[in-house]
Image (cartoon, coloured by chain):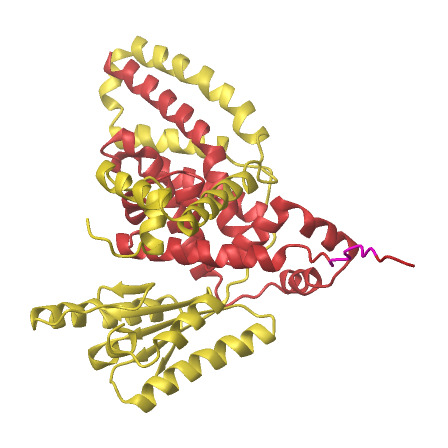
Chain colours: A red, B yellow
Amino acid sequence: MKILSFFSRGNDLQNELNLIRPRLYRLAYSWSHNAALADDLVQETMIKALKNIGQLRDPSLLNSWLFSILANCLRDHFRQYREMDDIDELEDYLYAHDQTPEEEHSQSQIVARVRSAVAKLPLGQRQVLTLVDLEELSYIEVAEILDIPIGTVMSRLCRARQALKNLLKELSPQQETHASQIRRIK
Amino acid sequence: MDNKPISEEYLNSFVDNQLDPAEKMHVFDIINQNESLKVRVCDLRSLKEIVKHAYGQPPGFSKVARNSPRLWTARLQPLAASILLLIGGMAGWLSHSWTVNERNQDVASVIQSTQRSDTLAAESRKIIIHVNNDNPMKFKAALDETESLLGSYQRAHQQIQLELIANQKGVNLLRSDISPYSARIATMQSKYPNLNFMVCGKTIRMLHNNGESVQLLPHTEIATSAADQINKRLHQGWGYIKI
């Protein structure tokens, strides 16, 4: 019976991992704003989770544990590639600041604007903001996942929202006010 | 509960449902009497919703890879289980580590996606600036250096992340009751979201032990210790400037 329960537990784990995979991807994408990198990070997180599943004492903490692995994977990625600047990305960045009609159109769309603003936040603030807003985690959980004091979570979140508010104002399409003037002509 | 003005951090805690019922009631009471506070709460709630909305459907999520191969493993596992039961004597041979590793390989291949990472996210420049004494010239130099770095990278459309950490008497730069630069620091914080001010936790504990009441400027973070933080950043490849 133990063997049967072992296999059913394996299935349960796979089901749970498959259920949480889209959430992990959403989080990875909100941190990196790069679909391919987000996909790689999620895969790496899943592999690490499966290798170290024995370390997870309390199954109810699976989600937090996976978010924590994801944060470590992203940190490792940046550490590994910190000497490299991708020329294509640099050009994308520069071109992205030309005021092309396409750019103006995308900037006018709320989703593009918010993502662009979130991408401009420092990674630490971005991580706290998305864990609280997208995953609706408590400050204590976020502190544990990112391995930072709770005061830092509060401070980063506060600064992230203030910066986001300002960035959204900056990124909102500037509409010139052509107020129609009515004059009485005698 | 006193009648001190509600800080931005506290308001965020309220919006994020992190307060206990008594604290929440207190905030509700204050909000009801204060229109500007109502607007701030509304703004924060809108921001939360808008962030959630922006990532409702992130682009490029590959669903193909996680579904089809999984069916094979789902079918194979009961089959493997029955074979193992038939050769019951072999069951003991299945040590925990072997089974876990074997399963890892199966599922690791299952979650392989068709997508490949051909681009790498460019990492921004990262610098930690260290102040450890209360010489007014040093304070000014630290802030000038910080602003000059942030400004020059911003003009060049390059990313930079900066941390200014203060320890020993340098923490006076970030104490709200002592710092001569509190207004300038607040302006810098709102202008540059990529700038962090930190103080050494050991210095703060020492000051508390000496009976001093330390009030830090808003948004100042407390590191375990300045040495630990600098060491950590150097290991992560950050640049280091001692003022």
Check the image and report above or below for B135 versus B210.
below
Give the residue furthest to the front.
A186
On the image, the x and y values in percent for residue A176 come to 74, 59
Picture quarter with the C terminus of chain B: bottom left
Whether residue A125 is visible: yes
Q: For residue B236, which quarter of the picture?
A: bottom left
Is A111 situated left or right of A29 in this image? Answer: right
The part of the image, by quadrant, that contains residue A97 is: bottom right
Residue that sits furthest to the top in the current view: B86
Quarter-wise, where is residue A16 in the image? Answer: top left
Q: Residue furthest right?
A: A186
Specify the principal SS of the magenta part. Answer: loop
Magenta span covers which residues? A176-182
Q: Identify the residue shown where x is 46% and y is 64%.
A: B193
The residue depicted at 60 percent of the width and 63 percent of the height is A86
x, y percentage for residue A120? Answer: 53, 59
Left or right side of A110 for B13: left
* Front in this rendered view, residue B184 or A15: B184
State the residue in front, A81 or B83: A81
- Residue B86 % position (x, y): 31, 8
Would residue A77 be visible to someone looking at this image? Answer: no
Is B227 placed above or below A24 here? below
Residue A177 colored magenta?
yes
